[in-house]
Amino acid sequence: MAITCSVFIATSLDGFIARNNGDLDWLPGSNGEMGNEDYGFKAFFASIDTLVLGRNTYALASTFKEWPYRGKHVVVLSSSFSSEPKHLVEGAEGLALAPQDVLRRLAVSGASHVYVDGGKTIQRFLQADLIDEITVTRIPVLIGEGIPLFAPSGRDIKLRHLSTQAFESGFVQSKYAIIHSA
Ligand SMILES: NC(=O)c1ccc[n+]([C@@H]2O[C@H](COP(=O)([O-])OP(=O)(O)OC[C@H]3O[C@@H](n4cnc5c(N)ncnc54)[C@H](OP(=O)(O)O)[C@@H]3O)[C@@H](O)[C@H]2O)c1
């Protein structure tokens, strides 16, 4: 079965996922604790079986009081790992593989819906045309500078708008399907 790769992420209105030093102080609920409104995260999380995280996103998640990915297969990417999995906390596996090779490996282990998270990691998967869906929740704040969600990819990436929902908090969430290049 083909693997679906999804992004579910929050950005400032000016397109950043974190401050330059990684701070998420501008993002309500960033300590891993959700308020009453979860912006569809629980349903999304229930739909995935695997996470592929960049090293920096893993570093943040591993500081949370509770491991936020319990019950899911977690792959952490870093060039400091190798193509043989390194055992990390809570059964997470550290790997250094190109996005295509990560998915080939996950296909063998039966993955069907992968949550790709972390700015650079998302950008690399997008560049390889391996992302299928993006849900972006825009937070009404301009932080001026930070770690961007998107980066130049050398080609246009077309998307199909699926839905947009505005919440009372002022958060605006849009879902897109990627139109694959071939
Ligand atoms: N706003 C949100 O919803 C949200 C969501 C997730 C994360 N964040 C924040 O975003 C920040 C992290 O974003 P980030 O752009 O720094 O990136 P990231 O994707 O979390 O981590 C980047 C690192 O992942 C490794 N990597 C990614 N793909 C790889 C590959 N194919 N092979 C080998 N290594 C690979 C590299 O590690 P090496 O340098 O070790 O090679 C790279 O430097 C954190 O501050 C986090 O809190 C925000």
Image (cartoon, rainbow, N blue to C red):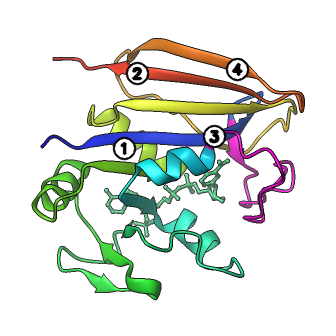
Q: Name the amino acid, label 2.
A: Ala
- 10 Å neighbourhood of mark 4: few (<14), some, or many (≥20)? few
Which is more foreground, mark 2 or mark 1? 2
How far apart marks 4 and 1 lie (CA) works out to 27 Å
In this picture, is 171 found above or below 49? above
Q: Name the amino acid, label 3.
A: Gly
How far apart marks 3 and 2 lie (CA) works out to 17 Å
**Magenta region, residue range:** 16-40
Q: Ligand 1 within 8 A of label 2's CB?
A: no
Residue placed under numbered mark 3 in the picture? 40
Residues marked 1 and 3 touching at CB (< 8 Å): no
From the viewer's side, name the closer residue of 165 and 10. 165
Residue placed under numbered mark 4 in the picture? 165
Q: Is label 4 in a helix, a strand or a loop?
A: strand
- Please give left or right for residue 11 compared with residue 5 in the image: right
| Image spot of residue 176 (x, y percent) | 48, 21
Q: Name the amino acid, label 1.
A: Arg
In this picture, is 170 found above or below 64? above
Residue placed under numbered mark 1 in the picture? 124
- Please give left or right for residue 81 compared with residue 116 in the image: left
Residue placed under numbered mark 2 in the picture? 177
- 10 Å neighbourhood of mark 3: few (<14), some, or many (≥20)? few
Residues marked 4 and 1 touching at CB (< 8 Å): no
Location of the C terminus (image quadrant): top left
At 27% from the left and 31% from the top, the residue drawn is 129
